[in-house]
Image: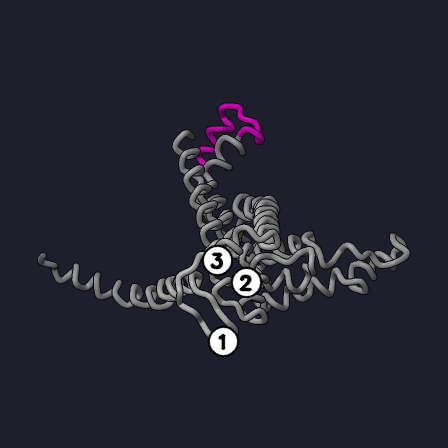
Amino acid sequence: MNFSDQDKKGWRLLGLPFIFSVLLLAVPLATMFALSFWTQDYLVLKKTFTLANYREAWFEPVFQTLFTRSLLISFTVTVFTIIFAFPVAYFISFYGGKRKALWLFLITIPFWTSYLLRMFLWKVILGYNGVLNSFLEWIGAITEPLTFLLYNSNAVVLALVHGWAPFAILPIFVSLEKIDRSLLEASNDLGDTAFKQFFRIILPLSMPGVVGAVLIIFIPTIGDYITPKLVGGPEGLMIANMIQVQFSKANNAPLAAALSVTSLLIVGSISILFVLLNKKHMRNY
């Protein structure tokens, strides 16, 4: 097969990124996949093929509970983040005027600080003697600090929604910016109410941004272990925390790898199904 100079130049440009992708992504994933079929006796890895790790990962009640809780928390975080992010993106796109750049700049301010620091501050806010309890006691709303604010799934959801909101606002804003405003003018001329206009034009045409925001939020939050560890407590721990424990304290890397592969399969399957359903919906629209 003969390649033109332009084709050769294109392959050279793609070659280095492809090699980096293989080395930094494909090789670690393949290694983890192979590791999940081995066993470990303290520091000794036994490379005899076994499915025991997957049987334990899939059928052990504690792991089933953690998988279910992780999916529920991640789904809840995704829903609430989209609900809060869409109005902000809509306001900036349609009413931001000449200050759109300023609003977008303000949205990026949380990125100026470490993600770990932002999550730790929620512990300070929701703690027994934290900012919120102190304020409620000061105004006389409560007589003693509330204990249900921290160390549960609700605290994890709240912290994650705050932490990932900018990642949802930006892609939705981009989709809203691409909407042809003449369509809205035509809708007004035909007598559509604001409610009909939103559901017939704005929401369907902004779905690419919404889908992108959903994937950006859902995929990483299900693997977050910092936030559950800081504000979740025993009731808010997720599967990523168990994977971290198995890799470190329990010294059982094969089981941790099996849990990781299982998480990858679950998240990948749900994400692909969501994208396919959205494509079907858009074709029908």
Q: Quadrant of the C terminus?
A: top left
SS at circle 2? helix
Kind of residue at badge 2: Ile
> Mark 2 or 1 closer to N-term?
1
The part of the chain drawn in magenta is 181-196
Percent across and percent down for residue 44 are 46, 74
Query: Toward which corner of the image does residue 35 lie, by quadrant?
Result: bottom left
> Mark 2 or 3 closer to N-term?
3
Q: On residue 243, which mark appears?
A: 2
Q: Nearer the viewer, residue 179 or 85?
A: 85
Q: In this figure, what is the number of numbered marks?
A: 3
Which label lies toward us, 2 or 1? 1
* Residue sitting at x 63%, y 68%: 117
* Residue sitting at x 46%, y 42%: 274
Q: On residue 52, which mark appears?
A: 3
Is residue 101 on the magenta stretch?
no
- In the picture provided, is 138 more to the left or to the right than 229? right
> Disc 2 and disc 1: Cα gap in Å?
17 Å
SS at circle 3? helix
Q: Nearer the viewer, residue 6 or 40?
A: 40
Q: On residue 43, which mark appears?
A: 1
- In the picture provided, is 16 more to the left or to the right than 233? left
Q: Residues within 10 Å of mark 3 (few under 14, many from 20)?
A: some
